[in-house]
Amino acid sequence: MARILYFGKLSSIFGEMSETADLPASISDTAALRTWIDQTRGFDGVLLHPSVRIAVNNEIVPDPSPVSDTDEIAFMPPVGGG
């Protein structure tokens, strides 16, 4: 099973910091994963925003990048500061 992590305000929005999921065979990249999670969890497009970054196995990756059922996948919102 894939381990999916939500950081920052995403964990507040979704009500959890992490979950595990059996990824369907049709999910082979980060773009498809974003869409699948959004549709199955009813996240109202939050993960689809281009400012939400993804890390696969502790490495920030661009969309689309390969994912598998054994990966740790983290979603990170933009960080503000000044």
Image: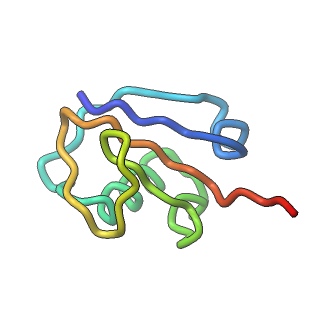
> Which residue of the protein is positioned furthest toward the bottom in this rendering?
50
Q: Is residue 17 left or right of residue 33?
A: right
Which residue is drawn at the image coordinates 32% and 46% (left, top)? 56
> Which residue of the protein is positioned furthest toward the front in this rendering?
82
Q: Is residue 63 left or right of residue 5?
A: left
Q: Is residue 28 left or right of residue 20?
A: left
Which x, y percent locates residue 9? 72, 45
Which residue is drawn at the image coordinates 55% and 39% (left, top)? 6
Q: Nearer the viewer, residue 66 or 16?
A: 66
**Vertical placement of residue 70 versus 42, above or below:** above
Q: How many marks?
A: 0
Quarter containing the N terminus: top left
Which x, y percent locates residue 23? 23, 41
Quarter containing the C terminus: bottom right
Q: Is residue 10 left or right of residue 24?
A: right
Q: Colour mode?
A: rainbow
**Vertical placement of residue 40 versus 29, above or below:** above
**Vertical placement of residue 77 versus 45, above or below:** above
Which residue is drawn at the image coordinates 19% and 32% (left, top)? 70
User: Where is residue 14, by image quadrant?
Assistant: top right
Which residue is drawn at the image coordinates 59% and 69% (left, top)? 51
Which x, y percent locates residue 4? 41, 36
Which x, y percent locates residue 77? 63, 55
Q: Nearer the viewer, residue 59 or 30?
A: 59
Q: Nearer the viewer, residue 5 or 42?
A: 5
Q: Nearer the viewer, residue 43 or 56?
A: 56
> Which residue of the protein is positioned furthest toward the right in this rendering?
82
